[in-house]
Every structure is written in structure tokens, then in C-alpha cells.
Image (cartoon, rainbow, N blue to C red):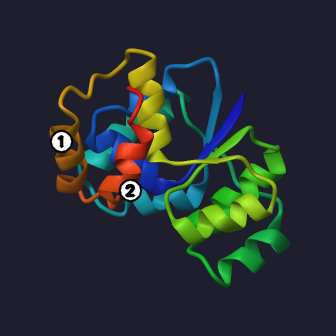
Amino acid sequence: MKIVINSSPIIFLVRLQALELFLNNNYEFYTTPSVVTEINAKSDEISRALTPVLAAEKLIVQSTNLTSLFNRLHKSFGRGESETIALATELQADFVILDDLAARKIATNLGLNVKGTLAILKKLVVEGKIEIGNKDEFYQNLVNIKFRISRSIFDAVFRDV
């Protein structure tokens, strides 16, 4: 299974100490040079957490060859989202992990199977890799790390866990 990941899901998964838990699957995980550049622009906990993941090749950095698609997307989206969507299209990825709503809509229109950070977190909960404990506290933790999500969407995603 091939999964292409954009920067914001990586950032939030690191902040929740869940990135390596997600990447410890028998899947192929990809990201793009622009995503790595964006994350490494700051020397912080996120860039420090990403370095060993890249060194261990748990997350493969790959450029896209679909430059015309990238250029069309880049008129409306940032470099990271544009490269991520183009690479997912090129690799015929099973999933592309994006949080930006407009980027998610375009990716879906291009026939990609889109998931977001909440779907990853739910998967980790269902697999028993993380525990959310009190849902109110978990929601507040997401808000505290600047993850923008309405309570109603959060409740809908985590209703059955």
C-alpha cells in the first residue's frame, strides 16, 4: 500500500507523538521535497523528529514527474500540497494524507482516496497503538496544538471508539 503525506499531518502527528506509530506499518510512505523543506525551515521538535524517520527510510522523499499537474495545482495551492497531490497521482497511491479542505476536494476530484490527520488518529486508536482516554481532554489537546477542527466533526469521527 502506498501512502503520500503532506506537511500538516506530519506536524500534528509529531506533536501528538504518533508519527512513528503510524509509520510502523508494512506500507510504503512517501512525502515530497517541498514538504521536507517546509518542515526543516524551522529547527524545532518537528524537524528533529523527522530527521531519523527520513534516515531510516520509513518516509521516502520523492519528487513528482507530473510537472504540468503540479503547475496547475500550484496556481491555487502551496508547493507542498501541489507536490503531494501530484506525487499521489503519479504513484497511484492508495491514500493521500491532507488536512487542507480545498486541497482535499481537488485531490478527491482527481480520483485520489483522501484521508486526514483525524483518520490516522482513529486508526491508531482502533489498532490499540494510542489511547485517547477522555474524549474532551483529547479534543482539547488537539486544540492546544493548533489543530483546527470543529467539535462536531471530532465527535463524529470518534463516536464509536
Q: Which quarter of the image is occupied by the N terminus? A: top right
90 is higher (above) or lower (below) than 71: above
Mark 2 or mark 1, which is nearer to you?
1
Q: Is residue 34 left or right of residue 92?
A: left
| Residue 154 place in picture, x, y as percent | 36, 48
125 is higher (above) or lower (below) than 156: above
| Residue type, label 2 | Asn
Q: Is tag 2's residue or tag 1's residue first in the polypeptide sequence?
A: 2
Residue 40 is labelled as 2
| Residue 149 place in picture, x, y as percent | 35, 58
61 is higher (above) or lower (below) than 59: below
Could you say whether the residue bearing mark 1 is in a helix, strand or loop? helix
62 is higher (above) or lower (below) than 126: below
Q: How many other residues sit within 10 Å of disc 1, few (<14), some (14-19) or many (≥20)?
A: few
**For residue 131, what is the image quadrant?**
top left
Residue 136 is labelled as 1
Along the line of sight, the residue nearer the viewer: 51 or 80:
80
Q: Is residue 84 left or right of residue 125?
A: right
| Residue 78 place in picture, x, y as percent | 56, 74
Q: Is residue 86 left or right of residue 157?
A: right
Q: Residue furthest bottom?
A: 75
| Residue 80 place in picture, x, y as percent | 56, 64
Could you say whether the residue bearing mark 2 is in a helix, strand or loop? helix
Which residue is at 71% across, 75% downward?
Answer: 73
Which residue is at 44% across, 41% downward?
Answer: 157
| Residue type, label 1 | Asp
